[in-house]
Image (cartoon, rainbow, N blue to C red):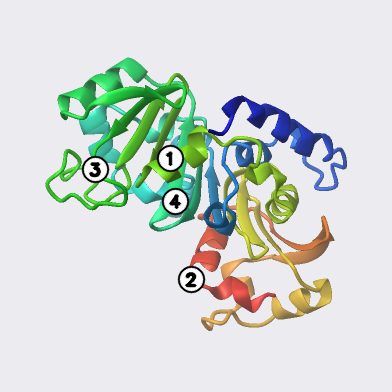
Amino acid sequence: MRKPLTIIVATGLVLAGCSDDSTGQSGLLGSGLLLALGRVHATEQTRASVEYGEPAAVKALVDKVKGKDNAKDKLRYQMLQGVGYSSIASFSVSLEESLGLRLDGFDGAIFAGKAPKQATVLWGDYDVDAVEGKLRDLDIDGEPAYGGTRWRSAGDYEIDLGGPFADTVPLQQLNDIVTSDGRFAFAPAKEAVEWVTEPGDETLAGDDVLVGLAKCLGDVVAAQLQGTGEAVGVRGDGTQIICLKGDVDRVSDVLTGNMPSGRPWQDVLPGAAAAEAEGLVRVTVPPPESGPVGQVLAVMRNGDLAGLG
C-alpha cells in the first residue's frame, strides 16, 4: 500500500528546486499547479495527460464580469469553467441536485489519465456529511478507506445504465468515490481512485517533463499538460500561455502564418509571441481588452498545437 503522507515530502523536494522565478510570477514556489502534481501517483496513464483548474477562482472571475454591457465580455472566462474536472463538468447541475455538491466551489482540481483509466480529485471545503447522506439515499454503501469513506456504485470500468447515477452521470466516472474532509475524489475503478487518494512517494511532482511544463506555465487558474511535452494555460489576469519543445525562431515564424486548421494564428491568439523559458518555448498571449479567453485550450484539443512544434 502506498503511503499518502509522503506526498508532502515529495512535493517539497521538487518545489525546493524551483528557486529560479524566471517566469516573473511572484509566488511560483507555491503555485497551485506544481503542488497539485504531488497529489497524483505517477503511472503511464497519469503521466500522459493532466488537466488542472481552480474552480472557485474561475467562478469568481465569471461572476465578476456578469454585469458587463458587452455580451462577449460576459463570456470572458466561460471556457475555463470545468477545467480540472471536465469528465463530469457537463453534469454539474444534476450533481448539485442529487448530491448537494457544488463543483465550482472547490479551491483546486486535477484530472489525470485518459479514458477509461483516469481519476480526478477536488479539494476545498464542502459539506461532507450532507454529501455522504445523499450517497446513502442512493443506496450506495460506504466503507472506511483512503483516509475517508469509499463509495462503490458499480464494478471497475462498468457502465451501469440502471445504477444509482444513471440519471445523473450515466457513464462510469463515479463508479468509485472517496469522500473526506476537504477532498472529493472519483474514478471509474479502484486502481484509478487510488492514484489520487494514496499517491505515495512516486508522484507527478517527480516527473521532469510535467514539472518543467508547470514551471513554464506559471501561476495559472486552468491548464492542460501532455506527457509528450506540450501544455497550455490561462492566468487569472487573462494572459494565455503555451509551452512546448521546439525552436523559438521557428515557432515565431509559424505564428505569422496559418494554423493547421486554416485560420491565422494571430486571429485566434492576437499578439502571441514566443520566447525561451525553462528550456522550452513559451508563447505568451496578452489578455484582450474585451472578449473571451481560453482559446489556447481549444488549440490543444483540436490538434492545432502540433503545428507549432
Q: Are marks 2 and 1 in contact (CB under 8 Å)?
A: no
Could you tell me which residue is drawn at 61 percent across and 66 percent down?
A: 269
Q: Earlier in the sequence, mark 1 or mark 4?
A: 4
Q: Residue furthest front?
A: 1
**Position of residue 211 measured from the top left corner of the image (x, y, whole percent):** 72, 49
Q: Amino acid at mark 3?
A: Ala
Residue under label 1: 193
The mark found on residue 184 in the picture is none
- Say left or right for 16 vs 71: right
Q: Amino acid at mark 4?
A: Gln
Residue under label 4: 118
Q: Earlier in the sequence, mark 2 or mark 3?
A: 3
Q: Nearer the viewer, mark 3 or mark 4?
A: 3
Q: Nearer the viewer, mark 4 or mark 2?
A: 4
Q: Which image quarter: residue 220? A: top right
**Position of residue 260 measured from the top left corner of the image (x, y, whole percent):** 56, 82
Indicate the secondary structure of the residue bearing disc 3: loop
Q: Nearer the viewer, mark 2 or mark 3?
A: 3
Indicate the secondary structure of the residue bearing disc 2: loop
